[in-house]
Amino acid sequence: MTNSSDYTPPKIWTWDAPSGGQFANINRPIAGATHDKELPIGRHPLQLYSLATPNGQKVTIMLEELLALGHKGAEYDAWLIRIDKGDQFGSGFVEVNPNSKIPALMDRSGPKPRRVFESGAILLYLAEKFGELLPPDPDARAEALNWLFWQMGSAPYLGGGLGHFYSYAPIKIEYAINRFAMETKRQLDVLERHLAAHAFMAGHDYSIADIAIWPWYGNLVRGDLYGAAEFLQVQDYTNVNRWANTIAERPAVKRGRMVNRISGPLNQQLRERHDASDFETKTQDKVEA
């Protein structure tokens, strides 16, 4: 790998060497399946294939919130997809999400199975399916959707930008880290100013906008993302911290964060979830890492 100060882009880019870094073994410039592997199917209408990254946490939190609201139809099986091992390139997963990214959902509650992929699309789909966590008032609904799509457009700068270059890249590039740190702090300031006048992202009520944003920015300011809290001086964003800590105390959020998790304390990991009782038995502790 060439030092950034000595690098001149070629006239035509070619994929002739691994990119380096933590996920170099699965990064490639083409799509499609690399191997045949069918996805498992459990007994519930909703089948989730995921990992507890911030994007994965969005959907498990949403499903746990729906169950807490009494929607039995939101019962789900959550199957672990090890993106570090290339599970997302299995033929069955690619059929559900041709983009080979988690999370991916199959809704088998109707006469024909329906696939839903992209985390924001899944949140919106579930909100409309169950009539929850998306305000019915047109103004509040528009505000919730504004912030839902803000997150979908903004978080790649936090994850693929700052997260990659600060935590995962094989070399530390000053320009890249500075560029994405500046953008991350700008985004935190956007949230800080908005939350100074609002309890939640869409106003007084908790919604899918909060569920989308919290796993990224809530985890960040609480010190649970990329180890970058001190680097970014996140304590300065007092309104974001207030919002993040309030949401972190919700029982459904605590449960949702555990599902498909493969790191951290074992008592905070529920590698696969097939029943609400799994949170109590924690049989996943016996699963070999």
Image (tube, grey):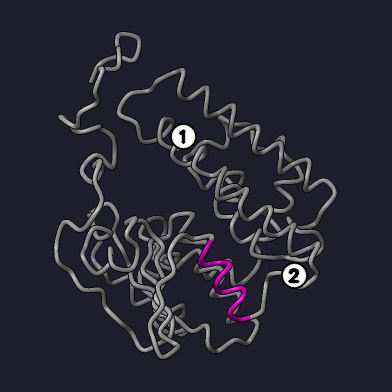
The answer to if 126 sits in the magenta stretch is yes
Q: Where is residue 226 in the image (x, y as percent from the top left)?
A: 47, 40
The local secondary structure at tag 1 comes to helix
Label 1 amino acid? Gly
Label 2 amino acid? Pro
Q: Would residue 206 be found to the left or right of residue 212 on screen?
A: right
Judging depth in this view, the residue of 36 and 112 nearest the camera is: 112
Q: Would residue 241 be found to the left or right of residue 63 on screen?
A: right
For label 1, the crowd category at 10 Å Cα-Cα, with few meaning under 14, some 14 to 19 and many 20 or more, is some
Q: Is residue 23 above or below residue 174?
A: below
* Mark number displayed over residue 161: 1
Q: Which span is picked out in magenta? A: 121-130
Quarter of the picture holding the C terminus: bottom left
Q: Where is residue 19 in the image (x, y as percent from the top left)?
A: 25, 32
Q: Is residue 71 above or below residue 26?
A: below
Q: Image quarter for residue 154?
A: top right
Residue under label 2: 135
Q: Is residue 122 above or below residue 30?
A: below
Instruction: Name the dominant secondary structure of the magenta segment.
Output: helix
Quarter of the picture holding the N terminus: top left
* Mark number displayed over residue 143: none
- Tell me the residue at 69%/69% (across/down): 134
